[in-house]
Image (cartoon, coloured by chain):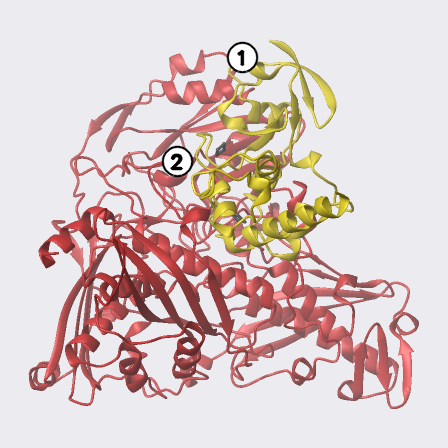
Amino acid sequence: MRLILTVNGADHAVDLDPRTTLLDALRHDLDLTGTKKGCDHGQCGACTVLVNGQRINACLALAVMHDGDEITTVEGLGEVDHLSPLQSAFLTHDGFQCGFCTPGQLVSATAMLTELHDGWASHVTENLTETLTAQPTSRAEIAERMSGNLCRCACYPGIVAAIEEVVVRSRADREAAE
Amino acid sequence: MTETLKLDGPSREALLDRAAQGAIGRGLDRPEGPLKVTGQAGYAADARLDGMVHGVLARARQTGTITDHRLEALKAMPGVVLVLTDGIPRNPAQGAVPTAPPAADGVAYTGQPTALIVAERFEDAWHAALAYDPQITPVAHDLDPETAATVETPEDKQRADDGWQDTWDAAPTKVDVTVTTPSLTSAPMEPHAAIAMWEGDQLTLRGGLQMLKFNRKSLADALDMPVAKIRLLAPYVGGGFGSKLGVAQEAVAAALAAKQLGRPVSVVMHRRQVFEATMRRSESRQRIRLACDDAGIIRATAQEYRVSNLPGEAFSEPVARADRAFYATDKLKITHEIARIHRMAAGSVRAPGEAIGIPAFEMALDELAEAAGIDPLELRLKNTVEADPISGLPFSSYPLADTLKAGAKAFGWQHRPPRQQQEGEWWIGQGLASAIRGHFAAEAEARVSLTAQGAIVETDQTDIGTGSYAILRQITGEMLGLDPADVEVRLGDTAFPPAFGSGGSAGAASSGTAVLLACRALRKRIAASLDAAPDDLTLKDGHVIHGNRRTALAQIVPQEGWCEQGHVAAGDISDKVRTTTCGAMFAQVAVNAVTGEIRVRQMHGTFAAGRILNHKTATSQCHGGLIWGIGMALMEELHHDPRDGAVVNRDFAQFHIPANADVPPLSVDFLDAADDWGGPLGALGLGELSISGAAGAILNAVHNAAGIRIRDMPATPDKVLDALDKLGS
Ligand code: FES
Ligand code: FES
């Protein structure tokens, strides 16, 4: 099937077997191998990408379902000499060891920041009457929202610390701007 | 020139203590980190080669003899270019083995991959692999370690001290505890993968592999070809934890298929194949008997173990290895039984032996403390030893008591009887366990080139998340007086000098020593060019300080640079001292009296493993071990189908590993002191220490919280509720 995949701002015209998952299309057909396959079953989060700004497991989506959607992969978050704030925070807080789950963690965390900012509540959100943006973000809140991304090296303490730093900093930046 | 060193005695390098450059030990960021956080680090399955096709391994659904692979229909399926059935090994090779993985003779365990389907597109190969349905004449096998007909008791793994029974009988306080642990699995996030490519008779294979020196020989043996004709590449490995120690089915199959097709072939195991066809940690039954005198000193110890493996596998989970000699005891008895059964192969999973042996032993110690009416911390302190009580060999360093005291203080240990603290439905309690893991020296080689721009380190050592890139850069920076940023480290390529690889926590100390030795040789060249003795030089910030002269290295090093090799060999240290690492781990848990759920609320570990080379990466590794302890204590368990031994829960939805929300605040610190016997670096292995006991701290805390002993791991809610029921609460 012919379709256009818009990935990290670039359009790719591809002709794919309809069984091709979005993950395999990225890895096998567009040579974007930053996005990883940890399970191919929607159970680990290594394949997380953004579709129109929201995080999904690319292994659970068929490529043909995303004709024309805006897709962002880890390659679209930053570059080696121009890291995103989350990417640098992962470095400083050692939010990875082997690094295999890391692309998924970073894409997931990027979307999570938006979800927090948009006031989406989670299972552990205690105060549902005040908007989330008015509450400090607890570590438990971050851990809960990142639990769809498994890390067997178990770098969870570093991942949470890195995200917390970015949340606190971006909140301070916003307040300074207001 | 090669600077060589055989480790026969203390050999600590004074330059590292002086730390003129201040590079050693610091918590520097991982140098390969920017590549990892941007998706640019190339793992085994990430290469995109011209003409590459995709192979998918296909499984046999039952054990027995294959009478017909029934390939005709498969070969006719769209896109299929090759179906391969010959030469796919039964299971992966064990760690540090230079010979081929075991050849298949029929189907030895359910799920064994017995065919490789190669197609132009991955989707076609996958489809055909699902359609694979060989005709098999079933053979009945033993599947249960408890009822297996063949149980081996290798002589060198047994021990029975004269007079054990008398000592046991005479002791006033004793416990007899049986702990069971299930089959477990490494489950690295990167599934096993290989991309093979031939140029003439030369094979290049990109693989998820931990020990390239051995893997290269093993693959050469499997393919019956010269070692020198194989190049292995593994610059980034997405976790190993033992599962990638040996060459596995995907690598051999990819190489064979690529040869037949004359095209590069990529074979990536599906997650379910990683679960059912690589290696498991054997289940274990561990009966531990401890007897102490009135002062709380242990007098008699008996450890009886049963583990299992497939017939013909030399490896058996070495449960008894470490714990036998690290506490006081007058008399010791060890029984080690290996049941031969047809579950998937058993092999090394992070800290084989200690990972399940120490928690069980530490649980038994907790029961002994209770029986003797002693604070469990106190009991351990009373029984720490200066020398191996069995062989009489002294320890090179063994500050177990210091880690226990420091850890207890950092954690806020307070001994209280069980069932004292409640918060609503939750019982709260504390527990502790020691961490104990043997250390061994290994052979390794490395090359370091020095130019006016900086240094380049090359060795086939791997970094599987362990921090090799970081620490080798720091060691070189310290030895040559360079900003670590000016040191480039190249790893995971058999074109470089051979290291030991990542296994047994031996990678850092061995490859680091080889790099240090190469740097020593470079220092000699620098000294010679200044007519000075190497010891009189201070190298710092790219300058050489000699007497009152300070000269830029760039002015000394010739245009083409200098290149030196280092080679460290394991000498006879193990005949002279016991080298071991140790630590103390503490947990606070909450046990829900209504649902049976256990939540770990806090964990602390204080560890001693000689000199810590990078505090940041070392801390992360220790976090990892503590979290694996949470998994082992509370959730991880491979279930085998009693009818055919198959792994039933072969994915992450059903085999639970700790997720982010399962992990409480953790703290880790180190007694950071070079071990004189730990080679020039004074560093001992660290990667496996913190899992070696962690589950024990948690289950001991469960007892302290709710008064229940869960001896059958993992402590799932059903077991907790049963135990609470029996307690009558
Ligand atoms: S690969 Fe998609 S969730 Fe695991
Ligand atoms: S860093 Fe290795 S799996 Fe997360």
Q: Quadrant of the N terminus of chain B?
A: bottom right
Name the chain letter of the residue that bears numbered label 2: B
Which numbered disc, 2 or 1, marks the residue closer to the eye?
Answer: 1
Q: Nearer the viewer, residue B60 or B294?
A: B294
Query: Which residue lies at the image location 41% right of the left edge and 84% below the top edge?
Result: B395
Q: Which residue is mark 1?
A: A18
Q: Which lettered chain is shown in red?
A: B
User: Which amino acid lies under the numbered mark 2 shown in the image of this protein?
Assistant: Gln
Position of residue B123 in the picture relative to residue B143 (left or right): right
Q: Which chain is yellow?
A: A
Q: Is residue B200 above or below residue B281?
A: above
The amino acid at mark 1 is Pro
Does residue B1 lie above or below A57 as drawn?
Answer: below
Q: Circle 2: is it few (<14), some (14-19), or many (20+) Cα within 10 Å?
A: many
Residues indicated by labels 2 and 1 sit on the same polypeptide chain: no
Q: Is residue B204 visible?
A: no
The residue lying toward the viewer, choosing from B42 and B622, is B622
Q: CA distance from mark 2 to mark 1?
A: 25 Å
Name the outermost residue toward the top: A1
Which quarter of the rendered picture does the C terminus of chain B lie within? bottom left
Check the residue under mark 1 and report the chain it is in: A
Residue B273 marker: 2
Residue B553, image x and y in percent?
87, 73
